[in-house]
Amino acid sequence: MAVWSRLKPRPEEGTNGGGRRRGRRWAVGVLVVALLAGAGAYVAFDRARPYLHGSGCEVRTSLGTMPLDLEQGANAATIAAVAFRKQLPERASVIAYATAIQESHIHNLPGGDRDSVGMFQQRPSQGWGTPDKLRDPVQATSKFFDALVRIKDYLDRDLHDSAQLVQRSADGDAYAQHEPDGKLLATAFTGREPATARCWYPPDDKTKSRRPEALREMRRAFGSRLKVGGPGPLKAGAPSRPDSWNAIKATNPRAGWAVATWAVTHAQAYGLTEVRYAGKRWQAEAGHDGWTPDKDATATAIIVR
């Protein structure tokens, strides 16, 4: 009996009790492995995320959402900038956007029908200028607006009527279908609704910083009234210091957001890494996240790095 008593399993060491402990240990092990795998997957995803979205821009306003590629985003910002330089009403920008959508999908085309070139498909043979000038989005937009303001009562006419009197197209009615999109783009790029345009691109597409050239091009589009300061250089050909910054004075909120949006849409081309304005910040490394809160971003100047 004594021997049997010693060999008899104690209640806590019985077959079921040991199995439960082994089961618990196995479950804990599985959980640890799952957690480690999940953490590793999150780290991998976080590192890969900037590459997953590709490149592009998006406008998201109360009127709707519109995807754009990087060139379309930059050209759309240029149209708004030239309108600010010429101190034109928002309706003029709406007409320009609808026209550019119809003519080129807001791309700076090297050619087109007959001798048409550029974003507005203007023809040198019709007196618009040389092909080189018409392939320059700033000059092409300026020429479009110069012709538009010569149209009597252009603000009160139907959009397609005003656009056709400028363009002299084969089908002038075609501009009308793009008026809703023109209004959407004007809402974002002229700054009527702030922080409504974002752009992104993968780290592999990052370019060397050329901030002085970017700011000089910005002033060419917006005009010499644009006041730029800060420790960063502005002189043509000056080296860009990525750790430095420049500040563009915001004359009013709408102009401020137009400038900030121009910087975001031109960031990839000029190697800009950050734009801060009016409580918001955009960063190139997280461009797809768009504008995020930044309580230190002033409303008096747009900071560009």
Image (tube, rainbow, N blue to C red):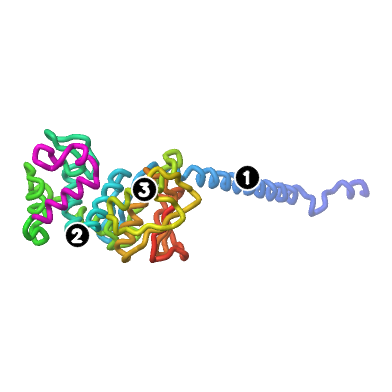
Residue 31, percent from left and from top = 62, 49
**Real-space CA distance between mark 3 and mark 1, rounded to the nearest whole angstrom:** 50 Å
Q: Amino acid at mark 3?
A: Ala
Q: Is residue 12 left or right of residue 157?
A: right
Residue bearing the label numbered 3: 214
Q: Amino acid at mark 2?
A: Leu
Residue 58, percent from left and from top = 32, 51
| Residue 282 at least partly seen | no
Q: Give the mark nearest the N terminus, 2 or 3.
A: 2
Q: Quadrant of residue 106?
A: top left
What's the residue at 8%, 55% (across, down)? 151
Q: Amino acid at mark 1?
A: Val
Query: Quick one: which residue is furthest to the front in this view?
Result: 235
Q: Give the mark nearest the N terminus, 3 or 1.
A: 1
The circle on residue 190 is: none
Residue bearing the label numbered 1: 33
The crowd level at tag 1 (other Cα within 10 Å; few <14, some 14-19, many 20+) is few
Q: Magenta segment range?
A: 122-150
Does dot 3 land on a helix, a strand or a loop? Answer: helix
Residue 189, percent from left and from top = 28, 56
The crowd level at tag 2 (other Cα within 10 Å; few <14, some 14-19, many 20+) is some
Main SS, magenta residues: helix
The crowd level at tag 3 (other Cα within 10 Å; few <14, some 14-19, many 20+) is many
Which of these two is toward me, 285 or 83? Answer: 83
What's the residue at 7%, 45% (across, down)? 168
Q: Give the mark nearest the N terminus, 2 or 1.
A: 1
What's the residue at 33%, 60% (across, down)? 257
| Residue 131 lies in the magenta-colored region | yes
**Real-space CA distance between mark 2 and mark 1, rounded to the nearest whole angstrom:** 63 Å
Residue bearing the label numbered 2: 88
